[in-house]
Amino acid sequence: MLGLLQEAGHVIVPDAADAQGVLVNTCGFIADAAQEAVDTILHYADLKKSGDIRVLVVAGCLVQRYGKDIMEEIPEVDALVGTGDYGRIVEVFSQVEQGGCPACIGDPGWLAPEGGARVVSTPRHFAYIKVSEGCSNRCSYCLIPSLRGPQTDRPMEAIVAEARRLAESGVVEAILVAQDTTAYGRALYGRPRLAELLRHVAAVEGLKWVRVLYTYPSLIDDELIDVFAENRKVLPYLDIPMQHGSDRILRAMRRRITRQGMIDVCAKLRRRVPRLVIRTSLIVGFPGETDRDFSDLLTFIDEVRPERAGVFVFSPEEGADAATFPDQVPAELAAERRGIAMQRLAAISRSFGESRIGAVETVLVDGISTESELLCTARSYAEAPDVDGVIYVGDATLRPGQFVDVRITDAADYDLAAEPV
Ligand code: SF4
């Protein structure tokens, strides 16, 4: 949307205080995210009331889910853009400027025009590349397929061309994302082709690191493992949302793999990929989750030992099948289970960090730390931006985007300290 607006002559400013119009792009797939989006919209609605901004447009999943309510409840909102209508963003701003109040909420599903302008909102040295939109899985707790539509893939050449453009502009780390990256290719080519895509993106001159997020465990096959094992630029870091460790709950979630299947995939990956780091996400408090299921989850964590993890409390979302399942787990019990699981995972993360003390590692500098002007924050292959911890390096002269060798000197639960060597 920013790319289209910029192409049409709008000037994008990073601070809303300098803007005449504000576009709020929303998440809305669980209640907490929807609340955060509503709070943001209300904040800008206040700025509109006080005359600090003239135009307020809201886009994204919250609009797709609750568009009419937003218009009725927050009259300061000038226009709505659903997840299938991002391509109309320029027209929407023009209509608002002419006194209109458009609500574009069609069917979900939209791919950005290939080769179109893109405004990268991450720091200059890394960028996310969306390889597909939507999801064709039907996990019983998830609204994403209804908010974003079935999976639609971008052509492989277009993704590689985008990677090339990004590398030419200074990006050294490309992070491939989709709702399910391992399914990439199935919609467009009839079979998953992530392994091939990774090889092509890794061959782009200038890119040093290629990272992949959101892989589905049942689709991690030998061809894909080979790429992680053999391609020097594809980082040995796998983000595999596993969701639970009890077969009963996995079935109810409509996940297409068993506990043992995931244990086997992780064991094979660890055998084949040196230095592998596994990240996962888990859900506790799913309807019907008994003490026994939860203890299965804990033994599953002990077996897989993911170095990185997030644990979420099940959120019953209107429209998702699991919201109507019997035996909903009380919120207090679910929160308690989350605390127990997080504690166990923090200990695994810490022991991984401690095992690295004394080692020399290559890190990518992100910039001066917000904690101290004397430190830089950096990441190794084992830390993805935003979701994982960081490495504090005791040298404030390093530049963002610079690779540097450091010796790890200390480890907390998630963050590390290091000195340049
Ligand atoms: S694979 Fe992910 S995005 Fe797709 S339905 Fe399942 S949880 Fe939702």
Image (cartoon, rainbow, N blue to C red):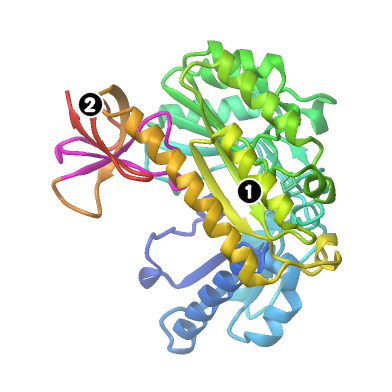
What type of secondary structure mainly makes up the magenta span? loop
In the rendered image, which residue does mark 2 sit on? Answer: 407
Q: Amino acid at mark 2?
A: Arg
The residue carrying mark 1 has its beta carbon less than 8 Å from ligand 1 = no
Q: Residue 367 at x, y = what percent?
A: 27, 43
For the image, the number of numbered tags is 2
Is 133 on the left-hand or right-hand side of 12? right
> Callout 1: 10 Å neighbours few (<14), some, many (20+)?
many
In the rendered image, which residue does mark 1 sit on? Answer: 282
Figure check: 157 above or below 115: above
Is 189 on the left-hand or right-hand side of 103? right
Classify the position of the N terminus by image quarter: bottom right
Judge whether residue 300 can be spotted in this image.
yes
Q: Residue 345 at x, y = what percent?
A: 50, 45
Q: Is 386 covered by the magenta stretch?
A: yes
Classify the position of the C terminus by image quarter: top left
**First along the sequence among labels 2 and 1:** 1
Judge whether residue 183 can be spotted in this image.
no
The range drawn in magenta is 375-399
Is 376 on the left-hand or right-hand side of 196? left
Q: Amino acid at mark 1?
A: Leu
Q: Nearer the viewer, residue 94 or 168?
A: 168
Which secondary structure lies at badge 2?
A: strand
The residue lying at 45 percent from left, 17 percent from top is 205
Figure check: 188 above or below 222: below
Which secondary structure lies at badge 1?
A: strand
Q: Nearer the viewer, residue 123 or 253?
A: 253
